[in-house]
Amino acid sequence: MVVEVESFFGVYMLYCTNPKFKGRIYIGFTVNPERRIGQHNAGRHKGGAKRTSGRGPWEMVLIIHGFPSDIAALRFEWAWQHPHISRRLSHVARRTRKESSLQFHWRVVSNMLRVAPWSRLPLTVRWLRQEYRLDFEPGLQPPLHIPLTFGCVRAKKKQQQQPEDKEQEESWVERCLLCREIVKAADRLSCFHPSCMMVCHLICLAKHFLKSESTHLIPVEGDCPVCHRSVLWGNLIRHRNGCYGDLEEITSHSSQSHWADELKI
């Protein structure tokens, strides 16, 4: 099954299969994985990167997605590309002679997922090609709210609102359960349980969840103020962004999971 995600921001790893350059790794940022791998393999004149042009074919083997914005994803990309310059990764040892480039870059990203601020974001680690899969080392397991998944992911275009839908939305007034002010579509957050009618401002619900985590700026989980079920913040954000397929996958393990948020602080 191909998972479709709205507002997609991801950082990917390419693996070179060209016998002359086999095993080389390239780290990049994309809002559209399918289009981006095509550009890399088509060459620089088709939008590919200078470092990958003329060295293909390349395979996109791994992608980290769930970033709240392009800026957050680009910062992650830079740190993954330059681990020995990033102050957050000063503890990561340099590549050993026994390590392949793939193994080294996997070790780097494994460390990154355990360091703030990335350790509190609602990220998903997704292997796109099973034959390249590596497992997390025992001492480098990510937080429980960051799942390791498999299979293809596709950027989903947001549907353009029809004039009649916009008029209907403007006539239909929803109020935040917590502050009782009117909720606009851009600020709306709802519970993903089918029988729950909870609607709140994103900020209001975040503050509500943080009452039990006063030392943090980003919520991880909390109880829905309507159905009173324990919900993961990242799952609420996934639901808001139209990521229903992946939501089901993660929710089935929610008793062991923790998620974080996309708040732009």
Image: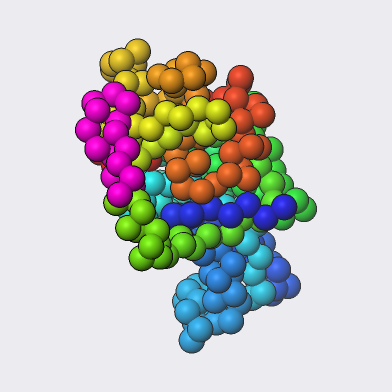
Query: Is residue 103 covered in magenta?
Result: no
Residue drawn at the location 35% of the way across and 40% of the way down: 188
Q: Is residue 195 left or right of residue 79?
A: right
The answer to whether residue 53 is left or right of residue 167 is right
Q: Is residue 180 magenta?
A: yes
Expressed as whole percent of the image width and height from the top left, the position of residue 118 reads 42, 37
Q: Where, quadrant-wise, is the C terminus in this rendering?
A: top left
Q: Position of residue 222 (x, y in %)?
A: 43, 20
Count every numbered label the image shows and give the total.
0
Residue 49 can be seen in this image: yes
In the displayed structure, 31 sits above or below 51; it is above
Outermost top residue: 212
Residue toward you, 117 or 97 = 117
Judge left or right: residue 168 versus residue 24.
left
Identify the residue at the far right of this view. 131
Residue beneath the point at 34% across and 32% down? 200
In the image, 189 versus 206, the foreground residue is: 189
**Between 32 and 100, which is closer to the camera in this rendering?**
32
Question: Magenta stretch?
Answer: 171-185
Question: Residue, x 33% and y 45% (percent of image)?
Answer: 172
Q: Is residue 145 visible?
A: no
Which residue is depicted at the point 48% across and 86% down? 45
Q: Main secondary structure of the magenta part?
A: loop
Q: Nearest the camera: 6 or 134?
A: 6
